[in-house]
Image (cartoon, helix red, strand yellow):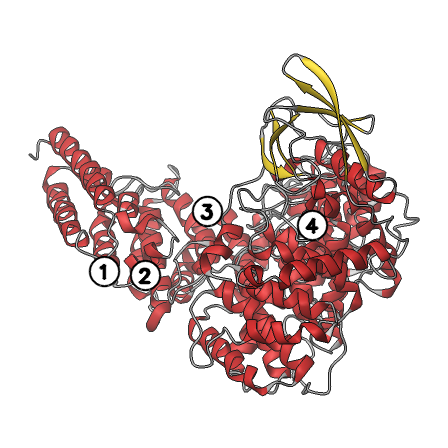
């Protein structure tokens, strides 16, 4: 499968996926993209008003010749299709499931023009799903057989690549091994490409194939991918493709739904006996493992996201973790897999085309713990409509609403929802094979032993009886991106603070904090289970997904008088988990300033911690001092020294926001402001620039520091231009543009620095105007030179000449207008 095919999945048409929840009505104000109605051969759209409208029919299918473009499907087998509850997709999928279990007939009541008519088609009868489907199920077995026959067609073997190969392996039938070998052999034994999406899935295919067959011809191909991953890794993860990070984009350009497959590849390679660079392996293992048990795996090196599934990323990481034998990894696999099983409401939810959620929903939910098998069963049973809607007449599968070519590339991986419980692949829980070698991994790759508590899948003490299904819980609680329907039921929130799922706990804790439920939060803060204590801390800090602490849930006096003893107990306990410490540091910063100052040494200790989550929490705890110059002034030299050494975008942004508040404060002592401005300039000069590709991160850090402070310190404009000119000279920027990562080929990103950018950055031109004619005119002259140098960029291969000229014209006009106002023409 080539890069174009993968990116059709990754960056395909954006589906309004939050409207495709199971048991949640579709939105009548939205028109939904074209989709196919299972094996019927009907292609339809959902127009505004939830009118399911025929777009076309596929030749050689039951629907051929029976419908016209524009027909509105009103009912199927007597049940509403257009504007039903819960939504059209489910109504159609359920009709397909019922027809295959019965006589195969689908009676459509349609509106054609001004008339209502009935159109009947008959689809093949496969029987009903068994109670244990897809295991011991004749219908499932036939679906698998048909899908394998579809993949094995010569024209289709050209397309699905690693996804098709993984599916054929997952059937457990050795007759497909020659075809899988052909797919494996397409990978070079000498050098892998630099496309993370391709390499990760290809690596899993090759590793699984070798462990099944012992075919040593596969090993050099797997080794080549491992070597490439070593060369392109930064901060433990990987970007989309190419050799360089993209500064500021999900922290260094990391793209976890692609990178986590490379972690699986490295683990499988070690099991295959391949020598893998230990540093690369250790960094990846630590980086990804720490997300387990903390809501959803994010897209880059952020804090975890606040919803179930994470566009399938939790299932992807479950597949990687189940490859390792240790307790920590098996617990991680189980909690991540359970999260996938419970997320059946989130069908197709996520960024871009949501292909990760589609593919990993069934694939990633099979590793639930033994006592939660009912959760897997419920998830599959809730999803029969979905899989039957995604099936195609030829035996293949299509991803719901992917667009023009829904059967392309990774869609065949949907079929692995049917084969995953067979546990024929290592990523779905297959045992080691005779070709497996022992993989050495640390007992706990991140955190402390107590961090394992966050990987538990049992309810916390005090939860009581399970009375609601997951979809009902999250309907009431909401998630980080959707408001809850229940906002006042304290008893419900107290119960859900003790749920096994971290998203449920977090949302319940945030609700109690908003209600000012002091006694309930204090009780949770003193609970024996660190999972409950952590969510109490989130209630206090109003924890923000991605960012950490938010607007305090309680006044500083309440934090100091009621919660502080318990917060300090956590901070002073040498065995406290990293995740608890993170919440406690954030909460400490919300106490009264005297109490924060009394414990300043604790904060200073964590400013130097190896884990950036804890460093960011410590920077956040200092934010209240932005209103108290006398307290912060003695700390400034140490803080600026630490800032210069800080390589991660997120902690730096907290610190820069903090210092910006000092400069903006009209009541702050001018001497403190001067020290802040001088300290920022020195920290900018001292910011580490690492060798090689990671130098882009350091340059970005310098640039962010400068542009953050232009509003308060316009005299930094020349330093901004210094960094800008250096960035323009980087030979890899145009290559990044060709990879599609940003509009770098038209160099429009320069406007964000010279004209005006985000994050409160006024831009160099406005800064020059603030400085006045004498100081500002030379700055504008430098800006003109930069604009002129863009002429050289037009000569680069693949240059977007109209885009460059548009950028030049825009900047030129802004400079011209500024000069007129300044009288500096």
Relative to 281, residue 108 above or below? above
Q: Are marks 2 and 1 in contact (CB under 8 Å)?
A: yes
Whole-number angstrom distance, CA of label 1 to CA of label 3: 33 Å
Task: Please identify, in this view, whether the residue under mark 2 or under mark 4 is nearer the observer.
Answer: 4
Q: Are marks 2 and 3 in contact (CB under 8 Å)?
A: no
Tell me which numbered mark, 4 or 3, is placed earlier along the sequence.
4
Picture residue at 42% right of the left edge, 77% below the top: 191
In terms of sequence position, does the residue under pointer 1 or pointer 3 come before the other?
A: 3
- Write down the residue under mark 4: 308
Residue for badge 2: 699
Secondary element at tag 1: helix
Estimate the x, y position of residue 507 in percent, counting from the top left.
Answer: 71, 44
Element type where label 3 sits in the image:
helix
Q: Residues within 10 Å of mark 2 (few under 14, many from 20)?
A: many
Residue 239 horizontal/vertical position (percent): 46, 62
Sequence-wise first label, 4 or 1: 4
| In the foreground, 577 or 802 | 802
Marker disc for residue 726: 1
Dot 4 crowding, Cα within 10 Å, few <14, some 14–19, many 20+: many
Check disc 3 and report the residue beneath it.
Answer: 626
């Amino acid at each position: 499968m080539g890069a174009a095919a993968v990116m059709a999945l990754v960056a395909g048409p954006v589906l309004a996926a939050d409207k495709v929840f199971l048991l949640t009505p579709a939105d009548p104000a939205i028109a939904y993209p074209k989709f196919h109605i299972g094996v019927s051969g009907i292609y339809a759209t959902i127009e505004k008003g939830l009118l399911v409208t025929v777009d076309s029919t596929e030749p050689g299918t039951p629907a051929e010749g029976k419908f016209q473009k524009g027909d509105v499907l009103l009912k199927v087998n007597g049940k509403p299709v257009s504007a039903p509850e819960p939504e059209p997709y489910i109504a159609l999928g359920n009709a397909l499931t019922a027809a295959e279990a019965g006589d195969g007939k689908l009676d459509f009541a349609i509106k054609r023009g001004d008339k209502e008519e009935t159109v009947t088609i008959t689809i093949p009868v496969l029987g009903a799903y068994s109670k244990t489907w897809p295991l011991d199920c004749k219908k499932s077995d036939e679906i698998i057989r048909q899908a394998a026959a579809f993949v094995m067609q010569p024209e289709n073997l050209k397309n699905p690549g690693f996804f098709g190969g993984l599916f054929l392996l997952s059937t457990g039938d050795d007759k497909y091994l020659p075809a899988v070998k052909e797919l494996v052999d397409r990978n070079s034994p000498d050098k892998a490409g630099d496309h993370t999406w391709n390499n990760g899935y290809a690596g899993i295919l090759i590793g699984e194939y070798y462990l099944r067959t012992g075919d040593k011809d596969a090993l050099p191909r797997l080794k080549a991918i491992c070597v490439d991953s070593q060369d392109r890794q930064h901060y433990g993860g990987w970007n989309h493709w190419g050799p360089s990070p993209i500064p500021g984009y999900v922290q260094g350009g990391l793209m976890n739904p692609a990178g986590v497959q490379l972690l699986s590849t490295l683990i499988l390679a070690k099991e295959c006996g391949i020598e893998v660079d230990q540093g690369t392996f250790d960094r990846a293992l630590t980086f990804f493992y720490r997300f387990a048990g903390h809501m959803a795996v994010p897209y880059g090196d952020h804090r975890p996201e606040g919803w179930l599934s994470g566009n399938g990323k939790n299932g992807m990481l479950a597949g990687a973790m189940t490859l390792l034998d240790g307790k920590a990894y098996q617990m991680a696999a189980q909690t991540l897999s359970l999260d996938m099983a419970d997320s059946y409401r989130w069908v197709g939810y996520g960024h871009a085309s949501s292909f990760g959620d589609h593919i990993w929903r069934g694939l990633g939910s099979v590793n639930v713990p033994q006592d939660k098998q009912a959760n897997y069963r419920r998830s599959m049973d809730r999803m029969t409509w979905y899989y039957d809607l995604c099936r195609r007449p030829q035996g293949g599968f299509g991803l719901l609403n992917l667009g023009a070519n829904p059967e392309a590339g990774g869609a065949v991986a949907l079929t692995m929802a049917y084969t995953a419980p067979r546990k024929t692949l290592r990523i779905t829980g297959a045992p080691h094979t005779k070709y497996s070698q022992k993989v050495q991994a640390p007992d706990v790759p991140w955190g402390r032993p107590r961090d394992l508590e966050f990987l538990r899948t049992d309810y916390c003490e005090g939860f009581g009886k399970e009375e609601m299904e997951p979809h009902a819980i999250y309907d009431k609680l909401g998630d980080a991106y959707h408001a809850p329907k229940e906002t006042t039921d304290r008893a419900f929130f107290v119960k859900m603070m003790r749920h096994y799922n971290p998203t449920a706990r977090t949302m319940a804790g945030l609700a109690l904090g908003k209600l000012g439920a002091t006694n309930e939060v204090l009780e949770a803060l003193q609970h024996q289970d660190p999972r409950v204590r952590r969510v109490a801390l989130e209630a206090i800090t109003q924890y923000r997904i991605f960012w950490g602490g938010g607007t305090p849930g309680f006044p500083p006096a309440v934090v100091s008088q009621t919660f502080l003893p318990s917060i300090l107990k956590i901070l002073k306990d040498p065995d406290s988990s990293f995740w608890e410490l993170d919440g406690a540091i954030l909460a400490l910063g919300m106490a009264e300033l005297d109490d924060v100052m009394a414990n300043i040494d604790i904060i200073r200790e964590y400013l130097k911690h190896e884990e950036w989550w804890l460093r960011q929490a410590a920077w956040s705890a200092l934010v209240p001092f932005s209103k108290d110059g006398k307290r912060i002034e003695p700390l400034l030299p140490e803080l600026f020294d630490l800032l210069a050494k800080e390589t991660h975008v997120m902690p730096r942004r907290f610190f820069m926001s903090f210092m910006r508040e000092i400069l903006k404060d009209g009541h702050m002592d001018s001497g403190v402001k001067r020290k802040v401005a001088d300290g920022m300039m020195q920290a900018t000069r001292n910011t580490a620039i690492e060798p090689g590709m990671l130098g882009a991160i350091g340059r970005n850090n310098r640039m962010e520091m400068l542009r953050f402070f232009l509003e308060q310190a316009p005299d930094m404009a020349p330093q901004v231009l210094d960094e800008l000119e250096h960035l323009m000279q980087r030979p890899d920027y145009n290559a990044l543009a060709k990879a599609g990562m940003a509009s770098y080929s038209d160099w429009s990103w320069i406007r964000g620095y010279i004209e005006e950018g985000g994050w409160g950055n006024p831009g160099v031109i406005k800064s020059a105007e603030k400085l006045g004619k004498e100081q500002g005119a030379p700055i504008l002259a430098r800006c003109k030179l930069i604009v002129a140098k863009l002429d050289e960029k037009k000569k680069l291969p693949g240059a977007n000449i109209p885009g460059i000229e548009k950028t030049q014209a825009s900047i030129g006009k802004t400079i011209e207008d500024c000069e007129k106002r300044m009288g500096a023409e």
